[in-house]
Image: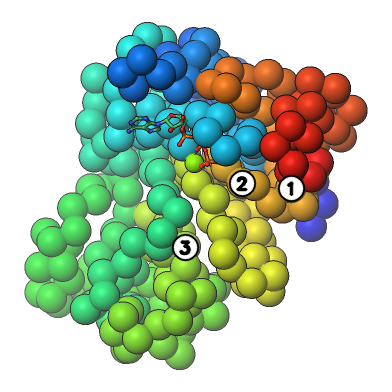
C-alpha cells in the first residue's frame, strides 16, 4: 500500500466537479462555556482517505458528531453532494449513504456473525435493524443474493468460518472485523471512522487499514480519525490537522510534517509526528 493510491488514477472515475462529496463549512459547536469546534471547514472526496488528526480534546470526535448528525452545530453548514443536510437526522443521513462508526465495535451479540452482516442491508435502501431482522427471517428470493453478498463480505475479513457463531463468542479483534464487514455490507458513500485502530494488535491493524483503503478504492469518501501516525501516513491521501477546535493545517502527510504549527501542536502533547 502506498499513500497515493487513491490519487490521480482514481480521478478518472470521478463524477462532475472536483469529487467533493461531503463538505463542512465553518462549523462551530459549543458545550456550555466551552467552544469545542470553531470555524472548522473541511471537505471529503470520493476515492480518497482523508485523515483528521490532532491532540486529545482537539474536537475531532465532535466534528464527526456534527457531520453525522449525532450533534447539531451552533453555526456553519454540512453539505452532502452540494445539498444542505443540516436538518437531517442521523438515520436520514445514513439512508443517503453517510455512516459514522464509533470507537467501540457495535454488533448484535445474540445474532450470528452472518446475521449481523445480513441485517445491515444496503445503507441506501434503509438501515433499520429490527425491520431488517424480521425481513431476514422471512426467507425470500432476494435474500439468496443478499446472503451470498454477506458471505463474500465475511470472507473478505476472514470471518467466514465464524458465520454461524453468535457475535458474543467472537474475540475483541474479530468483533472489530465484524463491524467492518457490516460497514462493507452497508456500502456507504461516505464513511467517518473514529479511531478504528485503537487497542488493536499490529496484524489486525494492517488488515483494517487494507479494508479502509479498499473502501476508498471502490469509491467511498473516507474520513479517518486516528492517533496512529504510521497508519495516517500509510493510507491517507490528505490530512486535516485540528488543535483547540480549529483546523490548523491541511495537506499531504509529507507537507504537514514540515509545518512548524503542526509539529508544535503535537510536540506540545508528547505525540510523535
Ligand atoms: N457532550 C459533551 N459535553 C461537554 N463537552 C464535550 C462533549 N463532547 C466533547 N466535549 C469537549 O469538547 C472538546 C473536544 O472533544 P472531542 O471529543 O471532540 O475531542 P477529540 O479530538 O475527539 O479528542 P480525543 O483524541 O481524546 O478523542 C473536549 O474539551 C471535550 O471535553
Ligand atoms: Mg475523539
Using residue 63 as the reference point, say whether residue 244 is left or right of it: right
Using residue 264 as the reference point, say whether residue 29 is left or right of it: left
Q: Quadrant of the N terminus?
A: bottom right
Residue 111 location in percent, x, y?
Answer: 23, 77
Mark 1 lies on a secondary structure that is helix
- CB of residue at label 3: within 8 Å of ligand 2? no
Residue 249 location in percent, x, y?
Answer: 72, 21
x 31%, y 80%: residue: 168
Residue 89 location in percent, x, y?
Answer: 23, 31
Q: Which residue is tagged 1?
A: 229
Q: Which residue is tagged 2?
A: 226
Tell me: residue 181, above or below residue 263: below
Q: Residues within 10 Å of mark 1 (few under 14, many from 20)?
A: some
x 53%, y 21%: residue: 245
Q: Residues within 10 Å of mark 2 (few under 14, many from 20)?
A: many
Mark 2 lies on a secondary structure that is loop
x 66%, y 61%: residue: 210
Viewer-closest of 69 and 62: 62
Which is nearer the N-term, disc 1 or disc 3? 3
Q: Are marks 1 and 3 in contact (CB under 8 Å)?
A: no
| Disc 2 to disc 1, C-alpha distance | 7 Å
| Disc 3 to disc 2, C-alpha distance | 16 Å
Residue 187 location in percent, x, y?
Answer: 43, 52
Viewer-closest of 259 and 207: 259
Which is nearer the N-term, disc 3 or disc 2? 3
- CB of residue at label 1: within 8 Å of ligand 1? no
The mark lying in front, picked from 1 and 3, is 1
Q: Which residue is tagged 3?
A: 180
Amino acid at each position: 500500500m502506498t499513500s497515493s493510491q487513491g490519487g490521480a488514477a482514481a480521478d478518472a472515475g470521478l463524477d462532475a466537479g472536483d469529487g467533493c462529496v461531503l463538505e463542512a463549512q465553518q462549523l462551530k459547536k459549543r458545550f456550555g462555556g466551552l467552544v469545542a469546534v470553531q470555524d472548522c471547514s473541511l471537505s471529503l472526496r470520493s476515492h480518497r482517505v482523508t485523515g483528521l488528526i490532532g491532540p486529545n480534546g482537539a474536537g475531532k470526535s465532535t466534528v464527526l458528531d456534527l457531520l453525522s448528525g449525532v450533534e447539531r452545530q451552533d453555526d456553519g453548514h454540512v453539505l452532502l453532494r452540494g445539498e444542505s443536510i443540516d436538518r437531517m437526522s442521523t438515520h436520514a443521513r445514513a439512508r443517503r449513504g453517510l455512516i459514522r462508526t464509533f470507537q467501540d465495535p457495535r454488533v448484535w451479540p445474540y445474532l450470528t456473525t452472518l446475521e449481523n452482516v445480513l441485517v445491515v442491508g444496503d445503507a441506501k435502501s434503509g438501515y433499520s435493524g429490527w425491520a431488517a431482522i424480521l425481513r431476514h427471517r422471512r426467507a425470500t428470493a432476494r435474500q439468496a443474493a443478499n446472503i451470498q453478498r454477506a458471505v463474500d463480505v465475511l470472507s473478505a475479513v476472514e470471518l467466514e468460518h465464524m458465520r454461524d457463531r453468535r457475535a458474543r463468542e467472537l474475540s475483541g479483534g474479530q468483533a472489530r472485523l465484524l463491524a467492518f464487514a457490516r460497514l462493507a455490507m452497508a456500502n456507504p458513500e461516505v464513511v467517518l471512522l473514529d479511531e478504528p485502530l485503537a487497542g488493536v494488535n499490529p496484524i489486525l491493524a494492517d488488515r483494517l487499514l487494507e479494508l479502509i483503503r479498499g473502501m476508498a478504492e471502490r469509491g467511498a469518501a473516507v474520513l479517518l480519525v486516528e492517533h496512529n501516525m504510521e497508519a495516517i501516513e500509510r493510507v491517507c491521501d490528505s490530512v486535516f490537522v485540528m488543535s483547540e477546535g480549529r483546523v490548523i493545517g491541511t495537506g499531504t502527510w509529507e507537507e504537514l510534517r514540515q509545518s512548524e504549527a503542526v509539529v508544535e501542536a503535537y510536540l506540545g502533547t508528547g505525540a510523535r509526528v
